Each structure stands twice: as C-alpha cells, then as structure tokens.
Image (cartoon, grey):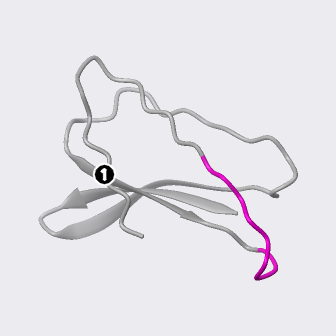
C-alpha cells in the first residue's frame, strides 16, 4: 500500500512525505511539528480486487481536527 501526505497550498497539493508498505506487515510513521494548514492523506491499496482491508489513521493534536473521507 502507498501512503502520501500532502499540504494544500493555494489550491495545489505539495507532497510532504510518502511511505510504501506490504499489506501483511505492520507499519507506521510519525511526523511532528507540522505547520498549521490544510492537509490531505491519501491511502492506496494494491491487491486483488476481492480483498478487503481496514485502515486507521491517528492524528494527535491539542485542538480538534476535522477529518473528511472523500471516497
């Protein structure tokens, strides 16, 4: 699977970080001290068409963050 973090700047997306992982392995990473702004986290799975996966994203912040699923 591929995970990409983008920052939205003036209507355009700037790639901040990316990571690739095999679906059978544990994975995780953390970015600290991101400047405030709008971000987009994209997760793309690579598998056979009938496989089902459940993904979780944890975001830690002192303030509430609005999360929107676009699909």
In which quadrant is the C terminus drawn?
bottom left
> Residue at 33% across / 34% down in the picture?
34
Q: Is residue 6 above or below residue 49?
A: above
> Residue at 19% across / 44% down in the picture?
37
Q: Viewer-proximal residue, 7 or 67?
A: 67
Pick out the residue farthest to the right.
Answer: 24
Q: Position of residue 23 (x, y in %)?
A: 80, 57
Looking at the image, residue 25 sits to the left or right of residue 66; the answer is right
The residue stretch that appears in magenta: 47-55
Pick out the residue farthest to the top.
Answer: 62
Image quadrant where residue 26 sits: top right
What type of secondary structure mainly makes up the magenta span? loop
So how many labels did they put on this image? 1
Pick out the residue farthest to the left.
Answer: 10
Asked which secondary structure carries label 1, the reply is: strand
Magenta span contains residue 54: yes
**Which residue in the structure is indicated by mark 1?**
39
Q: Position of residue 16 (x, y in %)?
A: 42, 53
């Amino acid at each position: 699977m591929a995970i990409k973090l983008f920052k939205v700047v003036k209507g355009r997306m700037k790639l901040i970080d990316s990571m690739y992982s095999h679906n059978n392995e544990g994975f995780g990473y953390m970015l600290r001290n991101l400047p405030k702004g709008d971000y987009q986290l994209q997760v793309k799975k690579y598998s056979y068409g009938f496989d089902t996966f459940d993904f979780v994203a944890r975001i830690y912040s002192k303030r509430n963050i609005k999360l929107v699923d676009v699909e």
